[in-house]
Amino acid sequence: MICEDVCGTTVLQSAVSEVFETMVFMEVEPKEVSEPFLAGDPWVMSSVAFRGNFDGVLTLVCSRDCARTVAMNMLALDDLNELDESDVADTLGEITNMTMGTLKSNLYDVVGELAVSVPMVVSGTNVTSQLGEADRKICARVRIGREFDLDMTLIYKD
């Protein structure tokens, strides 16, 4: 039903750009996915599941430093000491939720209504994902604020 022509890397990059440029006040530029992301480095991953005419999950992954910078910008903080780790998780979860909302709106004419879960945020040092037998995966990467990379993955059942 859905294919990369309908929801490809450009659609993912566009949704993230809209959210980051209006809510976080950071410039977003497309970037090629040419190398593994954050191997062994501290990272933060936020995901939102969706169900409807197609089911899946949207994930955003960035470095811990990127997540902190995003949180500071979105919360209009000047001092890193004002930032709590829960603020970082809440902010990245909200960014993922808004990105999914943008995708949902942009895809409505093609896929209809989608029910969306609350965001889940985890952090660690190794990022891996497993695909189920019938799952498809679309990956995109952007450069945020000319300093940080953010990976987006949309995994769905076709």
Image (tube, rainbow, N blue to C red):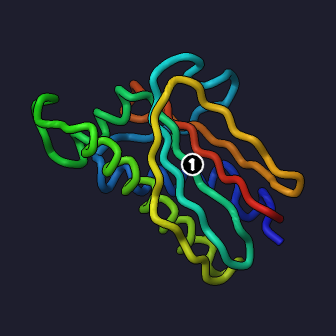
Q: Quadrant of the C terminus?
A: bottom right
Q: Nearer the viewer, residue 31 or 102?
A: 102
- Residue 108 drawn at (x, y percent): 61, 79
- Residue 118 drawn at (x, y percent): 46, 64
Is residue 139 left or right of 58 when viewed as pictured?
A: right
Q: Is residue 88 above or below residue 66?
A: below
Give the mark count.
1
Q: Residue furthest top?
A: 40
Q: Is residue 34 above or below residue 57?
A: above
- Residue 151 drawn at (x, y percent): 56, 38
Is residue 77 left or right of 94 when viewed as pictured?
A: left
> Dot 1: few (<14), some (14–19), or many (≥20) neighbours within 10 Å?
many
Q: Is residue 67 above or below residue 115?
A: above
The image quadrant that residue 89 belongs to is top left
> Residue visible at 18% across and 37% down?
83
> Residue visible at 79% across and 46% down?
131
> Residue visible at 63% across and 42% down?
140
Q: Quadrant of the N terminus?
A: bottom right
Quickly name the residue at label 1.
59
> Residue visible at 37% across and 40% down?
27
- Mark 1, secondary structure of its residue: strand
- Residue 29 drawn at (x, y percent): 49, 38
Q: Amino acid at mark 1?
A: Thr
